[in-house]
Image (spheres, rainbow, N blue to C red):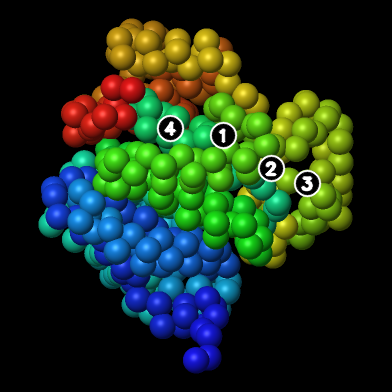
Amino acid sequence: MKSVSPKSKLLKQPRIIDVLEGSETGPTLIFVGGIHGNEPAGVQALREVFKEVHYVNGLLKGKAFAIAGNISALQKGLRYIDQDLNRMWTKESVEQHLENNSELPPTQEAIEMRELYDTLQHILKTEVGPFYFFDLHTTSSKTIPFLTVNDNLLNRRFAKQYPAPIILGIEEYLEGPLLSYINELGYVAFGFEGGQHDDSKAIENHKAFIYCSLEFCGMLHHQHSLVETNCQILDNCCEGISGMFEIFQHYKLRESDQFIMQPGYQNFSSVTKHEVLASHNGKPVTIASNAKIFMPLYQHQGTDGFFLIKPIPNFFLKLSAILRRWKIHHLLPILPGVRWASAKKDALLVNRKLARFFARDFFHLLGYRSKTMKNNHLVVRNRESVAKTKLYKKEAWFHA
C-alpha cells in the first residue's frame, strides 16, 4: 500500500481531527494544532496520539477534542493566507467578524475564525467542565520545548506540572492571540512550543506533551509509567533549563519591514549588551542589556522580531501569589490618578503621568500584565478576576 505523507493528509483535514470519549465522566480537553499553517507538527501529533489512545478508551475519564486551527494555511504550508489567525481574538475583533456587516468579502482567516469560534462555543455549551485548552506550536528558530502561559495563579498552578520552562507575560506584547481570548473566559489555557518547524523531534515532543496533559487533567488516569516516560522525553529535551521566565522586551515589526535575524540564535540563548542581533531595514539591531533571547524570527511571515526574557526568582513568584490571594490590588484606586476602568473591577485606568512612577514589576506582582492606551491613561488588566478557580478546586493537581 502506498504511504500517505503528513502534508497530503492535511489536504483533507477536517476541523475536528478526532475525539476521545471515556466511559466515565471527567474533564473536557481541547487541543488546537496548526493555528499557524506552517506549524503542522501539533496536528500530526494529535492525530497519532488520539489514534493510539482509542485502544484504551475504557480507561478514560471525560472527553478530549483535537482541533485543526487554520486549515487553509495548513494546506499551503503558510503561516497564514491573508492575516494572522492568532492575532484576531480581541473582543472587538471577534464581535466584528461575527457580525460580518462589511460589504467586502471576508478574508480566508475570517472564515477560519468563524468556524473555529463556532466549534469552540459548541464544545463549551454541550460538554461539562472543568475545561482545559492547549494551543500547539513550533518556532522558526531552534528551541527546546517550553510553555507560554498567560499570568494568573490558576494557569501557573497547572502548568508547573510539566518538566519544561514556563514563559509568563506574552499577553502583554501580543494583541489577539487565541489563548488570551480563552483566558478572558476564565479557563485554564496555555501554549506549548514543541521545537523548530522542520525538526522531526517536534512531533515526538508534542506527543509527549499531549500524553502528559491527558494524565495531568485526570483523563488518562493511573497510567503512571506512561506519563513518566513522556515527562522524561520533555525533561531530556529541555537541557536542564527550567523554572519561570518573563518577557520584558519585544522587538516589533511592520509587515512591510525588511528584517534579517543574525544566524545561529535559538530560544534561551544568552545575549549581551550592545550585541548586534539582526538587521532591520538595513540598520543593525542591538540590545541595551544582557538577557536571554526568545523566539527570534527566522521566517518571512510574522511581525515579532524577537523577545527578551529573564528568569523570575521564586521569592517574587511566592510574593505575587500571596498579594493576589489577599486581593491587595483592590487598594490601588485610593491612589491619586488611579481608578477602576469598569464596574467589573478587572482593569485599572492609570494616569500616564502617574504611571511613570510605578515599576512594571509592581503591576506584575498584583496580576496586571495586559495593557493598552486610552486617552491619557494606561489600561492594565487583571486576569485573576475572571479565572474560574472554583471549577478546578476539586482537581488533584490544584492541591498538589
Mark nearer the viewer, 3 or 1 = 1
**Crowd class of label 1 (few under 14; some 14 to 19; many from 20; radius 10 Å):** many
C-alpha distance separating marks 1 and 2: 11 Å
C-alpha distance separating marks 3 and 1: 18 Å
Answer yes or no: is residue 116 visible.
no
SS for tag 4?
A: loop
C-alpha distance separating marks 3 and 4: 28 Å
Instruction: Give the quarter of the image for residue 324.
Output: top left
SS for tag 1?
A: loop
Give how far across and how far down residue 342 sits, in percent: 26, 29
Q: Is residue 183 left or right of residue 26?
A: right
Residue with the mark numbered 4 = 161
Q: Is residue 147 left or right of residue 271?
A: left
Residue with the mark numbered 3 = 265
Q: Amino acid at mark 3?
A: Tyr
Instruction: Determine whether label 3 and label 1 are within 8 Å by CB.
Output: no
Give how far across and how far down residue 10 sits, in percent: 47, 78
Q: Amino acid at mark 1?
A: Pro
Q: Which mark is residue 165?
A: 1
Residue with the mark numbered 2 = 267
